[in-house]
Image (spheres, helix red, strand yellow):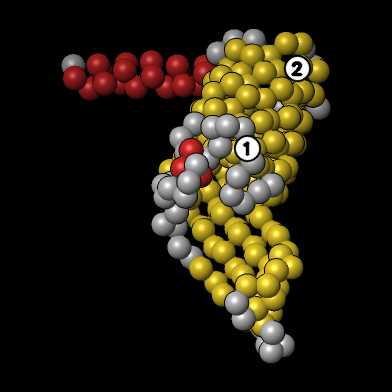
C-alpha cells in the first residue's frame, strides 16, 4: 500500500513539474555602462565616475503572460581610472586604477506588454557581494624612477551591498523558443558602500547606469 501511495505521489509531482516546465525561461545577458558615487547631499564623492561591465545568466518564471518573477547570477566589474598630475613629497605624477568585482544576485518582478514584440518593466533588489577589490597606483618620482603599488585591501568598503533596481526593456521572439532582449537598467545601493568615515564620505552610495542585451530560451515539455 505504501508503495502505491508513493507511486501516486511521484506521478502527481512529476506531472506538475512537467506542466510548469514551459513557464521557465533561461538566458544569458551582458551589460555595460557607468557608475558614480554620491553622498546624502547629492555631491559626487570618492572614486567616480567609472565604467562597469557585467555578464551572467538569468532565469524567469512566467506566472502568466503579463507577470513573471526572476533571478540569476552575474559577475560585475566596476572599474575606475584617473591620471593625476600633482606634486606630493617626492613624486610628481601618479595614475590610479580600481577594479571591484561583485557576485550579483537579482530578485526581480517583471511586467510585460505585447505579443511577439514585448515591452517590459523590471523592479526589485540586487544582492552584491564583493569578491575582488584591487587598487593599482603607478607613481613617477622626481628622480625619474617609477613604482607600481598593488593594494588588495577591502577595509574601507562594505563587501555586501543591497541595490534597488529598475529596468525598462524590450523582448522580441525569434521563434517559439528563443527571444532577444535589450534594456536600460539603473540601480543604486541602499546601504552605504563605505565602512570608514572620512568627513561626509561615510554616507556614500553608488549609482549604476547599465545598458544590457541578451538572449533567452523558453523551456518546452518533451513529447
Residue at mark 2: 119
Is 70 on the left or on the right of 34, as rendered?
left
Residue placed furthest toward the left:
1
Is 97 on the left or on the right of 102, as rendered?
right
Numbered tag placed on residue 43 in the rendering:
1
Q: Position of residue 180 (x, y in %)?
A: 77, 31
State the image quarter where residue 57 is shown. Answer: top right
Which residue is at a point 81% across and 27% down the rendered structure image? 174
Q: Residues within 10 Å of mark 2 (few under 14, many from 20)?
A: some
Q: Position of residue 201 (x, y in %)?
A: 51, 44
Q: Nearer the viewer, mark 2 or mark 1?
A: 1
How far apart in space, not on screen, are marks 2 and 1 (Cα)? 34 Å
Above or below for 209 versus 170: below
Is 27 on the left or on the right of 156, as rendered?
right
Quadrant location, the C terminus: top right
Q: Position of residue 155 (x, y in %)?
A: 41, 57
Amino acid at each position: 500500500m505504501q508503495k502505491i501511495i508513493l507511486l501516486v505521489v511521484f506521478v502527481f509531482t512529476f506531472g506538475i513539474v512537467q506542466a510548469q516546465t514551459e513557464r521557465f525561461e533561461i538566458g544569458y545577458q551582458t551589460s555595460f555602462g557607468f557608475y558614480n558615487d554620491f553622498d546624502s547631499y547629492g555631491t559626487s564623492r570618492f572614486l567616480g565616475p567609472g565604467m562597469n561591465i557585467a555578464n551572467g545568466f538569468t532565469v524567469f518564471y512566467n506566472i502568466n503572460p503579463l507577470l513573471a518573477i526572476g533571478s540569476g547570477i552575474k559577475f560585475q566589474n566596476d572599474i575606475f581610472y584617473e591620471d593625476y598630475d600633482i606634486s606630493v613629497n617626492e613624486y610628481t605624477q601618479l595614475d590610479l586604477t580600481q577594479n571591484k568585482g561583485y557576485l550579483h544576485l537579482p530578485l526581480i518582478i517583471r511586467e510585460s506588454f505585447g505579443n511577439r514584440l514585448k515591452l517590459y518593466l523590471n523592479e526589485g533588489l540586487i544582492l552584491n557581494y564583493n569578491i575582488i577589490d584591487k587598487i593599482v597606483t603607478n607613481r613617477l618620482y622626481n628622480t625619474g624612477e617609477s613604482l607600481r603599488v598593488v593594494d588588495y585591501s577591502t577595509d574601507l568598503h562594505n563587501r555586501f551591498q543591497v541595490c534597488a533596481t529598475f529596468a525598462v526593456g524590450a523582448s522580441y521572439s525569434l521563434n517559439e523558443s528563443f527571444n532577444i532582449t535589450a534594456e536600460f537598467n539603473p540601480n543604486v545601493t541602499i546601504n552605504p558602500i563605505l565602512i570608514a568615515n572620512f568627513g561626509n564620505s561615510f554616507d556614500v552610495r553608488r549609482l549604476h547606469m547599465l545598458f544590457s542585451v541578451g538572449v533567452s530560451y523558453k523551456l518546452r515539455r518533451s513529447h
